[in-house]
Amino acid sequence: MPLPAGSLLGPYEILTLIGAGGMGEVYQARDTRLGRLVALKVVSSDRLTDARGRYRFAQEARAVSALNHPNIVQLYDFSQDSATGTDFLVLEYVRGKTLREIIPDYGLPLSEVLNFGAQIAGALAAAHAVGIVHRDIKPANVMITPGLQVKILDFGVAKLAALAVASANGETAQMECTAPGILVGTAAYMSPEQVLGEPVDGRADIFSLGCLLYEAATGRLPFPGSNMVTIMREIATVDPPPPSSLVSGLPADFDRVIARALVKEKDQRYAAASDFADALDSLRDSNRSGQATGHSLRDQNTSLEIGRARSGASEKPGEKARRPAIEALRRCCCPWGIKASGRRHGHHQIWARDSMITLLGARFTEDERIQSALRTSLSILKEHQSPSGAIPNNVDCETQRPNFRAYADGGLWWIIGSSLVAPDIETSARILHWYECQDVDQSGLLSMHEASDWHDLFCTRGKGLYVNCLYVLALRAVARQLATTDHARSERYTERADAAARKLNALFWYQGDGELLPHIAHTFSTENRRDQDALGRKRWLPVKKHLSDERYYLPYLGFRAVGEWFDSLGNLLAILAGVADEEQTGTIFDFIARHELDRPPLFSLYPVVQPGDPDWRDYYGTRNLPHHYHNGGVWPFIGGFYVAALVKAGRMDAAVVQLEKLTNLNLRGEFNEWYHGETVEPMGVQDQAWSAGMQIFATECVSRGHVSLH
């Protein structure tokens, strides 16, 4: 049973379970003495059953702990909890993702393969120099930090695991190989000598690293047998095809470097890991030289480098992500439309919001599967329209049941999406009639319950900036469709859109003067004289606590309350909907730049809502902690709107720079849903449809030099 959060192992407080393996479970923990985070690898209770085995285990752990290298996760200690007798290893805690999570089906760019390979080989060389062999080099044991530094996990743990098994079996493990009959390592990455049960040295790690780099460059294993027996036979007897035969553009020199690492006879491989590192460094220098002259050794079809533009660019901005984006969108397609997520772990409903935002960019693809899914999404949402005209928030693919909970924006997005690919005036009119009923105070603006727009687990309520800018866009979309067939009706929708835009500017645009009365006066039931009501009684007025001297659109207006944070998407939609004038547009862009919200594009809000703030809610739980999810996370789909807004404002140079950042972010996270606002670590699900769709939309905006949302 996992250890509960808050329990102690020695001086270490358990925080959360982060993994499990053959030796036992791994926890994130806090050292109560030093205050630092650590990883605890707890040794299963059925291991280390005899004193001799535990002594040998401790001896080996001490040897591994002596390793001190920037690319090796440090082993701090091997200890036993005095209260429970639990044995555990204390390791450096590293933030990042494993190579297993990062390598896409089509492989990484050569520059990244060489960069990571050289770091791994250098770390192996340092370990081998003091007689320590890893024995289990594989993508899952290589972490990549947000700064692109390699950190090798479980150094020496394979040997420790063998010692633990030997102890449990009452056997004595040999110094230079595993216990008799025990295979240590992961089959697909084992060296021939490991497969044959022979003694191993550092050259076994070289073979395993060759397997890892082969997979990193091609997306395929060099020995892809269907079961362990087949894999082991291939490792011992079969030479894999050269990487360049699987991925066009990989150079022959890379084939030769990998082939030497994968030689069956260990005497014919690189004599030392340092030699392997030198070969990779040499190839990396050649690749850099080729890129500098515009002749890269391999097409750069993805990137792990955030915000760093590449040279060698006859390629249009954003184009290197087009094919991966289309592949991600294809994985989101199903018989009922475009699912929000394309991976097995994700959101498997047809969401009105997600599918229509995805449509903005996906409509530019020529893939019939994607085009069909877009049209089907429109149809299934329309089929479940309520009698009053509301479009559901989502439709479940498995049960076909609609969900209307986060209701405020789905219908508006349906109008915008349908206007671009399959105009339907009558359905749009029914939807807009339903929205008229949400204008509860007859102000011309929509009101909503809390957490009912895209921030569906956040405090936005009352009159929302985002929803009302969408309202303006939807009204203009319908007016445009009617312009040639029913001019009078078109004019009425245009007048409603203009009135809503004026009201947004009157109520939402904060002037940086500390005054909140103009933003809440519409909630009073009687006329007022500044801070007094009609009877001369003093009114309670909220005080501006955050961003008091900034100018921007407030995120929402509640009952005698306002949101004080900067809503990135809402402010961008104000630009795209034509609500913001030229001066306001410049002010919004200046705010984003000064607060570095585009550091990558784009942070959802600023500043984050902290516990104790008026907008903090207990229901946020761990999902909306500061810098998480809606509360200051980085959302690539918002980055797409940012690029579009820059293009609309004529800021093409800035749009190109931000598109490059967005492209690198999307490729690094494989079109992840969202990223941590401090570490920029991917935190959501991969193959998120609107991340891929808005990547294409941003690329098209830059390529065409204009924006079309209605």
Image: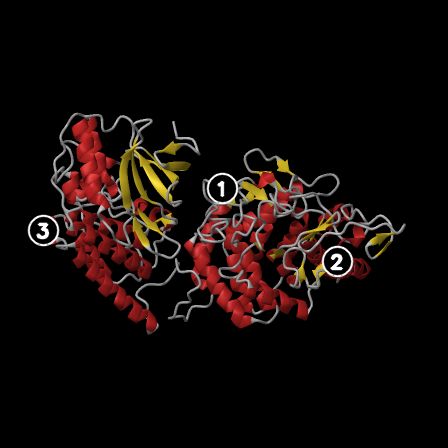
Q: Does residue 596 appear in this view?
A: yes
Of residue 136 and residue 529, the one placed in the foreground of this image is 529
Task: Report the amino acid beneath label 2.
Answer: Leu
| Residue 267: numbered disc | 3
Quadrant of the image containing the C terminus: bottom right
Q: Residues within 10 Å of mark 2 (few under 14, many from 20)?
A: many
Task: Describe the element under mark 1 as helix, strand or loop.
Answer: loop
Q: Name the residue under label 1.
A: 346
Q: Position of residue 4 (x, y in %)?
A: 42, 31
Q: Mark 2 points at which residue?
A: 507
Which mark sits nearer the N-terminus, 3 or 2? Answer: 3
Contact between marks 3 and 1 (CB within 8 A): the answer is no
Residue drawn at (59%, 64%) of the image = 591
**Rendering quarter of residue 291:** bottom left
Task: Report the amino acid beneath label 1.
Answer: Gly
Q: Position of residue 568 (x, y in %)?
A: 60, 57
Quadrant of the image containing the N terminus: top left
Which mark sits nearer the N-terminus, 3 or 1? Answer: 3
Task: Report the amino acid beneath label 3.
Answer: Asp
Q: Where is residue 411 in the image (x, y as percent from the top left)?
A: 68, 47
Residue ranking furthest to the left: 267
Q: Position of residue 593 (x, y in %)?
A: 55, 65
Residue ranking furthest to the front: 33
- Using the image, determine if residue 499 lies above or below residue 195: below
Q: Is residue 373 left or right of residue 54?
A: right
- Using the image, determine if residue 577 lies above or below residue 689: below
Task: Describe the element under mark 3 as helix, strand or loop.
Answer: helix
Mark closer to the observer (2, 1): 2
Per the model, the C-alpha gap separating discs 2 and 1 is 38 Å
Task: Describe the element under mark 2 as helix, strand or loop.
Answer: helix
Which mark sits nearer the N-terminus, 2 or 1? Answer: 1
